[in-house]
Amino acid sequence: MESSNMEKEIIIGAHVRYSGTGSAGEVLDIRSDDQGVWAKVDTTQLWYNSRYLEVMDENEYMKLKSRETKRETSKFNEDADEREITKKKLIKSKRTLKMWI
């Protein structure tokens, strides 16, 4: 089972990137059938045809995961900010409503 992009063998535990979306993960399982060799990736739990997977070295994979973590943290903070704004609006609306009652 060879990766056409980097000529590295795709094995269980290898870090790979799917060329279609750029998503990356660790290979959990490998199967083959009459349509090719397939690798199941942990991050999506999906099976990918190995011809569309690029084997990544450990450093490249860790850099990618670090960037994803930073993006997720940023998104979490943005969501938290939105929740705080909504909470403040709700409190203000409750105060306004109490004044009318």
Image: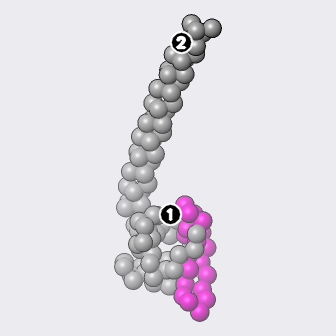
Left or right: 37 as drawn, with respect to 65: right
Residue type marked 1: Gly
- The region drawn magenta spans 27-45
Q: Is residue 2 above or below residue 12?
A: below
Q: Residue at x 39, y 83 (%)?
A: 4
Find residue 14 and report its horizontal and vertical position in percent: 50, 69
The crowding category of the residue bearing disc 2, from other C-alpha atoms within 10 Å (few below 14, some 14 to 19, many at least 20), is few
Q: Residue furthest front?
A: 100
Q: Is residue 55 visible?
A: no
Q: Nearer the viewer, mark 2 or mark 1?
A: 2
Residue at (47% x, 67% y) in the render: 15
Whether residue 74 is visible to the viewer of this picture, yes or no, is: yes
Residue 17 highlighted magenta (yes or no):
no
Q: Main secondary structure of the magenta part?
A: strand
SS at mark 2 in the image: helix
Instruction: Find residue 44 and report its horizontal and vertical position in percent.
Output: 56, 63
Q: Residue at x 43, y 67 (%)?
A: 21
31 in the magenta segment = yes
Check disc 2 and report the residue beneath it: 96
